[in-house]
Amino acid sequence: MRPEQQGVEVAVLVSVGRHPITGRARRADQDARGLELALGLERQLPGSRVNLLHAGPRGEESESALRGYLGMAAGAGMGLDTLSMLEQAEGSDVIPALAEHLAAAPPQLVITGARAERGEGSGLLPYALAERLGWPLVNGLAAVEGIENGVATLLQALPRGQRRRLKVRLPAVVTVDAAAPEARQSAFGPARRAELEVTAVAAEPDRELAEWQLTPARKRPKRLKIVKAASARDRFKAAAAKMEGGSGQVLEGVSAEQGAEAILKLLETEGVLR
Amino acid sequence: MSEIRRRDPRREWIARNRLHPEHLSVLAEQDGGVAASEWLGPNGVVRKNLRAIGFIGPNGVKRIDRSGAQQGGQVAGASRLAAQDSRRNVTIEAPAFLVAVVPDMPGGRLSGHDKDLLGLARRLADADPDRPGAVLAVIFGQHKGEGGGELKTQVFGEAGIDRLLHLDDDAYAGFAPEARLAALAAVERELAPRHWLLPDSPLGGADLGRRLSLSLGERPAAGVWQIEADGDAPLGWRCTARGAAESLDIQRPLPRVVLALAECAEPVDETRHAAEPLALSIEPPATLSRIEDLGQVAVDPAGVALAEAEFIISAGNGVKDWEGFHHAAKVLGATKGASRVAVDDGFMARDRQVGATGTWVTARVYLAVGISGAIQHLQGIQRCDKVVAINLDPGCDMIKRADLAVIGDSAQILAALVAMVEQQRGGQRDAA
């Protein structure tokens, strides 16, 4: 097999993030993790190429945030000194523009963050892209283990630190969240020198979003512990009660083997033994 | 005999009033043979048997309850039973519409998030009492109730489910979004529910919900945490959803597909629904999946963060055989935790401490070895599902919290447990 064929074409969709405390524009955390994953592919598959893609309005703030991604690739040498930017007016739908751009020159793997840090942030974009392009989608990626003959072996992150191995036929859309490897630092100089390749595209305004009311997030009310009691006596008991022995089973005066057997039975019914 | 207990307030009043002339006869009737504590002697003198008064409390101390709840010598045992049976039975024969819910069911049980979501579904279904809707739950794969048979469906009924569609097939096991989506599409074609509710959780609901909404051609509301009635909206409801990394509240009309956060509504606790099993007349078509699930990967339990570990074995002051403890953790594949004392004494690292000053854990199974259960430690394990305690002291607080407690020497019990697990695994390897 020729080594040139091993490399894959990867597109990383990046967005403008929002710092959770100051609210300033920054590189989005999940998207930066996605780019980190893509840069890690080069070590596995020499000859891979990464393209950065962004759709949205152009401004000074968003431009400096987007340059943060380009600063990550300093010295990676994967043709990563430009970022394709599809310029659109504020408040327009990015999905048709991205889908059109990806369909015109289809990469083998599209990596995105799970949710945007600005706007609606519903996490629907990767699903909508996969639906439009007709590609399979895998969410919550932790690592790419290998790509062979157009089939990628992926490690999906599950809650509670668990992992699942999946095989997916390329081309595919994958999303990363907080389980993916942390993004490297961004180098300032290369980020300043890098270029943004701006293309203006026709934009469809997102009318539904314009009709909604957006307000800064209110603190959610804490759920109260509701005591349902018929009489004042029961209510007092509930308020003043110390923790009582519940329905727990207590094995006293049994041999170590019997005790261990009971524990083993519980562990097996809960399915925590692997 | 009828199960319904009829109250006679006048008789109850007489039973409370020890000075009433009919007090004794009423008591004698109520007790049905239990020795009365007070009676009129042959010479017209009131005699009292003080030992027959009161009852033995939970700590072995005799208590006398004069509130009237206790009549004669015994506590009315029916009060607890009555509290359990206070749920109203609700059956909806001809629902005006359906509200479909697809719960996550982690570990085969309804999670707290699922129950909140079913509470939300009930709010949508019961909004108009004249034309109530039914809540349809679509469940994939095996489920475990708290009991078997009838009790199993009772768990679903008490969560507020009217119709239960249970799809148990190997095709839905593991990560199979395409097969599940095909099944939900079949439900949509056949039953056409008015609302689709899914949990916005990383356990699978968030993924499936977004796929479903796109295949239905709807724009979903993600991160919904509040709904309110609104006549102007197309479906009659407005919702408030979190957006932009939890920094925005989006107010919008409620769409057909809703992905709701935990605590979006109160879980059902006053009614018991029928949970009638339902089946699709047309089997969902078999799909050719482009994603192949190769199964879960063994992860190093020590590398899992303590706060999100699923199975924790935790050591306290009672552990003397530390070699044995570490070996047991390795064999069981559990993440190691420790109480404050074990950490202070230098047996475990500080980042392993469970409790108020350490990590608040959320394990499904928490195995506490030689931990007496200081209140700070019990706070740290509040959110654990099942707690197993191994301890020498039968009176300690950890035993009261535990679902299963074994009184005995921890080193021996752990050694026996390790031996059993190793034997089982050895047997499996031989068989394979």
Image (cartoon, rainbow, N blue to C red):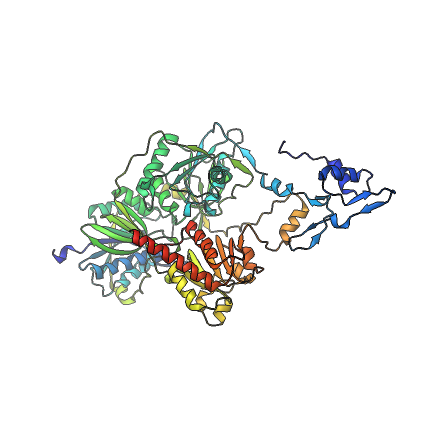
B40 relative position to A161: left or right: right
Quadrant containing the N terminus of chain B is top right
**Outermost residue, bottom side:** B346
Which residue is at 37% across, 33% downward?
B188
Q: How many marks?
A: 0
* Spot occupied by residue B171 in the image (x, y as percentages of width and height): 31, 41
Above or below, B429 against B316 in this view is: above
Above or below, A272 against B120 in this view is: below
A3 relative position to B151: left or right: left
Of residues A54 and A164, which is closer to you in this image? A164
Of residues B432 and B116, which is closer to you in this image? B432
Above or below, A250 against B12 in this view is: below
Is there any visible trace of residue B138 in the rendered image? Answer: yes
The quarter holding residue A83 reads: bottom left
* Spot occupied by residue B10 in the image (x, y as percentages of width and height): 76, 36
Which residue is at 44% across, 66% downward?
B351
Which residue is at 29% across, 45% downward?
A129
* Spot occupied by residue B178 in the image (x, y as percentages of width and height): 30, 41
